[in-house]
Amino acid sequence: MARTHGFSLSRRRLMQVAGAGMAVGMIDGRFLPTTVGAQDVDLSGQELRTIGLSVTVQDRILEDFKAKSGVKGTTGTAAIYPDATPKVITGKGAEFDVYEIIGERVPQVVDAGVVKPIPADSIANWKFARDLFNTPDPERFGEGRTDISRQIYEDETRTNLLMVPTVFNFDSVGYLPEFVEDEAANTWVSIFDDKFKGKAALNVDPLISMPQIAMAMNTLGLSEVKNPGNLSDAEVDEAIKWVIEKKQGGQFRSLWGDFGELVNLMASKEVVVADAWQPAVMAVKAQGVECKYAVPVEGYRAWAIGICAIQESPNYDAAVAYANYWLSGPPAITVSEQGYYSPVTTIQEAMDADKYGFWYEGKPWVGAEDRGIKEGDLRDGGSLADRSAAIGVWHQWPDNYDYLIERWDEFLNA
């Protein structure tokens, strides 16, 4: 039987979070921590204007933040990164207070001078961040900005955050088991397999697609790329040549960029295998079409989205409060129940125990069917611990971005 939490914070924890500037509010019959800033700041004269993917720019989250924080208004603009980034950079961010950006693109906006770092100690909830975001792992991922913990801070003192992570996940191959066997799907090679010619889809963003192209080529013995997230010019040339041949041979039904587009293609069975987001796979299942998420032998493609405060924003305090709020109960629950993860461990205290068990601990689903998830189902890939141990590459900003884009345009136009 599904359990409903009451007041899940211990008295000691309550005193700790209250001292960090947190309040306690009532949401859906449960007490949850709701944060509006590390200091007692009057936000009634400020507003919050944000831009980013529809994954995080959601009306219900913005409305809840407005109610909790007291800001006079919130507006959200949903846009894919190739469209959002120029909007932010061209106007020096004048139209926005926050860019909800993906980690690998942070250097792009930092170099453009539009980011105002946020002191880590001004984000009360950041003290509960997972080790993943604060412990570099050069043994697994090599030197440089190769994992998220080395992408989000201004410098090695780890004092100021360039981006406050709010959502993260590990992407893989989505497939329809009616047409694709598990063994065939559990590798990035499946997207490029001739068996699925004309029925495969590939993401249109090169920062997403190039790492998985490189991992597939490594598996096939066509390359020996050490860091799939940061290819050399020669490795880019090799990969583009191969993927152009695949495209011209009719491999791809679609080069997709929009969540809804991918869901429709797979639900209609026009696409049977694709690089996918796990929530997209679940959305396909919710339409009554059996869809699964692979565990690639090469490893997952890991990423994190977070909040950049805009340098010229007149609403900086609201931006900081918004980042802190994102690491509290309500928004973290919202995205967790869509198939993403929250960067803070305190999500366990905020969520219903059975739902937390399914989404984070690899436990069977308890209760009525929900969005295609039935009693006893397990989350594809297992627990957060299992999935985080199987990362193949973190999204990264490549050293040769301009060259990569030039060559990727050749692929798009081929």
Image (cartoon, helix red, strand yellow):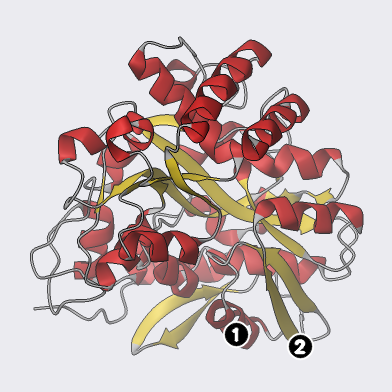
Vertical placement of residue 150 versus 141, above or below: below
Position of residue 96 measured from the top left corner of the image (x, y, whole percent): 81, 67
Name the disc covering residue 7, or none.
Answer: none
* Residue type, mark 2 in image: Lys
How many marks overall?
Answer: 2
For this rendering, which residue is in front, 267 or 352? 267
Find residue 319 and report its horizontal and vertical position in percent: 73, 66
Q: Is residue 220 left or right of residue 209?
A: left
Identify which residue, 159 or 112, lies in the foreground.
Answer: 112
**Which residue appears at 57% of the width and 52% of the height?**
305
Name the residue carrying label 1. 63
Figure quadrant of the N terminus: bottom left
Q: Which residue is mark 2?
A: 72
Q: With respect to residue 302, does 255 lie above or below? A: below
Secondary structure under the numbered disc 1 in the rendered image: helix
Q: Quadrant for residue 333, please give it.
A: bottom left
Q: Secondary structure at mark 2?
A: loop
Amino acid type, label 1: Glu
Q: Residue 189: percent from the left, percent from the top?
A: 34, 29
| Sequence-first tag of 2 and 1 | 1
Q: Are marks 2 and 1 in contact (CB under 8 Å)?
A: no
